[in-house]
């Protein structure tokens, strides 16, 4: 099939999903959205950014995207260089991240009974850090997949705790807050492969992943300290 075929299949599936959403989702009850206004959009972004906690939230998710998702394009090459797998095994390894997210979804109600957000942030950053450091070790693809499951669990434990804060940065401009949240996260994802691409040839996989692990551990502790106090609303 090749990479073009893979991208083509992804495009077809996306088009099917978009068409199904347009046809099957309920229509608005006669209410028409207001015409877009650039001035209004800028005002809402300013409203969000007036809350000093916004910079903490957006910096954290930027670093998450950089440290965690930056290594993903290099998983297959790491497996090949170690002689423990190729494309198929890389798919299983990366899929472990999603399994970790599902595991988080199943157990988070239990976690919320015993832990508060600050503790969840520290735990999430720590678990993700240990898992990412393990990805940098010379291990079998099955071990790497297990590390990715841990990485996904730790990521969602930290990320969703921060996302809770984002909902209250500016209650009257939640959509704008989430737009900046997503922008920061995906910018981290975009810059991450560049950072790892520079680091892997110079320092190797173990040191590069250890560097990402340090970022995640520090991020979890910083999030706990800076966002652990009661939610502060801007407007």
Image: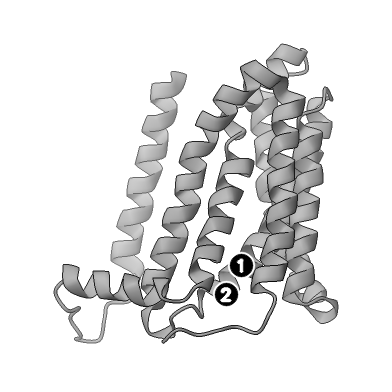
Q: Is residue 207 left or right of residue 226?
A: right
Q: Is residue 176 left or right of residue 117?
A: left
> How far, Cα to Cα, is label 1 from label 2?
5 Å
* Residue 123 place in picture, x, y as percent: 80, 61
* Residue 206, placed above or below residue 17: above
* Residue in view at x 71 percent, y 13 percent: 81
Residue 28 in the image: state x and y as whole percent: 26, 81
Q: In the rendered image, which residue does mark 2 sit on? A: 165
When asked about the image quadrant of residue 227, the answer is: bottom right
Is residue 102 visible to us here? no
Between 5 and 130, the one lying in front of the other is 130
Which element is circle 2 on?
Answer: helix
Quadrant including the N terminus: top left
Mark 1 is surrounded, within 10 Å at the Cα level, by few (under 14), some (14 to 19) or many (20 or more) other residues, namely many
Q: Is residue 28 above or below residue 143?
A: below
In this view of the protein, can residue 39 be seen by the observer? Answer: yes
| Color scheme of the displayed model | one colour
Q: On the image, which quarter does residue 30 sit in? A: bottom left
Q: Nearer the viewer, residue 125 or 80?
A: 125
Asked whether the residues under the numbered discs 1 and 2 touch, taking CB atoms below 8 Å apart as contact, a structural biologist would say yes
Provide the residue designation for mark 1: 162
The image quarter in which residue 26 lies: bottom left
Q: In the rendering, which numbered label is found on residue 48?
A: none
The C terminus lies in which quarter of the figure? bottom left
Query: SS at mark 1?
Result: helix
Residue 116 pos. (x, y %): 77, 77
Number of numbered labels in the structure image: 2
Give the residue displayed 81% in from the left and 40% down from the top. 146
The image shows residue 78 at horizontal and vertical percentages of 69, 20
Q: Crowdedness of circle 2 by 10 Å Cα count: few (<14), some, many (20+)?
A: many
């Amino acid at each position: 099939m090749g990479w073009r075929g893979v991208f083509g299949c992804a495009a077809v599936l996306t088009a099917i999903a978009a068409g199904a959403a347009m046809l099957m989702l309920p229509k608005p009850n006669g209410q028409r959205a207001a015409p877009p206004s650039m001035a209004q959009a800028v005002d809402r972004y300013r409203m969000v950014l007036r809350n000093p906690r916004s910079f903490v939230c957006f910096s954290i998710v930027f670093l998450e995207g950089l440290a965690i998702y930056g290594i993903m394009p290099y998983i297959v090459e790491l497996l090949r260089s170690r002689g423990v797998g190729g494309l198929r095994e890389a798919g299983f390894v990366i899929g472990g991240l999603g399994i970790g997210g599902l595991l988080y979804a199943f157990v988070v109600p239990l976690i919320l009974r015993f832990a508060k957000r600050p503790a969840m942030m520290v735990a999430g950053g720590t678990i993700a850090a240990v898992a990412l450091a393990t990805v940098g070790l010379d291990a079998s693809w099955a071990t790497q997949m297990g590390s990715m499951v841990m990485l996904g669990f730790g990521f969602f434990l930290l990320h969703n705790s921060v996302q809770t804060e984002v909902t209250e940065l500016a209650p009257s401009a939640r959509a704008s807050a989430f737009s900046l949240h997503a922008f920061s996260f995906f910018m981290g994802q975009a810059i991450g492969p560049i950072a790892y691409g520079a680091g892997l040839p110079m320092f190797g996989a173990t040191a590069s992943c250890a560097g990402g692990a340090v970022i995640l551990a520090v991020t979890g502790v910083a999030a706990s300290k800076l966002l652990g106090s009661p939610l502060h609303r801007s407007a």
